[in-house]
Image (cartoon, grey):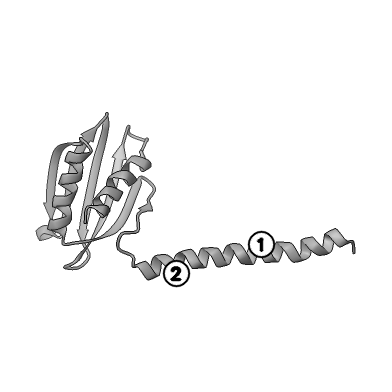
């Protein structure tokens, strides 16, 4: 067996182990910081568990709409206030913020920004949600 082959046999498992370890460390860091505040991409937008009651987070979402010049076009409340939706438009996109009560102090938030029937702007949705999380 050549010297290069021995190096590759040792190097590949070492690199694989290092990449697995870094993934575990990143997951542990998110876990240590708490799930609230971590913004994740979804298929159509972005999602996060946000600190605050559903009413507080809804008011913050309205403030973010004003800051980002998203024109509010509607809102809805369902399940006795356990779910709320805020709708708006910005630069030809339909922006939707869906809120669901997780507990008295946390709210699950999903943001979608739709350009057309099949085109979603996940980056814009993430920027809206990031501002909402930071507006705490």
Report x, y in % for residue 119. 37, 35
**Residue 57's image quarter?**
bottom left
The quadrant the N terminus occupies is bottom right
Residue 49 lies, with reference to residue 95, above or below; the image says: below
- Please tell me which residue lies in front, 112 or 79: 112
Report x, y in % for residue 61. 19, 48
Residue 110 lies, with reference to residue 119, above or below; the image says: below
Query: Going 12% across and 57% down the picture, which residue do you hit?
Result: 55
Query: Going 22% across and 51% down the picture, which residue do you hit?
Result: 98
Residue farthest along the left direction in this orientation: 80
User: Are there few (<14), some (14-19), or many (20+) residues within 10 Å of tag 2?
Assistant: few
The quadrant the C terminus occupies is bottom left
Q: How many marks?
A: 2
User: Are there few (<14), some (14-19), or many (20+) residues within 10 Å of tag 1?
Assistant: few
Disc with the residue nearer the chain's start (2 vs 1): 1
> What SS does tag 1 mark?
helix
The residue that disc 2 covers is: 28
> What SS does tag 2 mark?
helix
Query: Going 75% across and 66% down the picture, which residue do you hit?
Result: 10
Tag shown at residue 102 = none
**Residue 114's image quarter?**
top left
The residue that disc 1 covers is: 15
Horizontal side of residue 35 vs 135, given as left or right: right
Horizontal side of residue 13 vs 122, given as left or right: right
Residue farthest along the top direction in this orientation: 92
């Amino acid at each position: 067996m050549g010297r290069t082959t021995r190096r590759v046999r040792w190097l590949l498992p070492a690199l694989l182990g290092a990449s697995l370890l870094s993934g575990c460390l990143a997951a542990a860091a998110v876990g240590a910081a708490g799930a609230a505040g971590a913004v994740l991409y979804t298929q159509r937008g972005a999602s996060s568990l946000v600190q605050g009651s559903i009413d507080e987070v809804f008011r913050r979402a309205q403030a973010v709409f004003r800051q980002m010049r998203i024109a509010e076009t509607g809102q809805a409340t369902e399940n006795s206030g356990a779910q709320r939706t805020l709708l708006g438009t910005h630069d030809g996109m339909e922006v939707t913020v869906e809120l669901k009560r997780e507990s008295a102090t946390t709210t699950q938030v999903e943001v979608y920004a739709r350009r057309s029937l099949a085109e979603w702007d996940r980056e814009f949705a993430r920027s809206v949600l990031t501002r909402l999380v930071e507006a705490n």
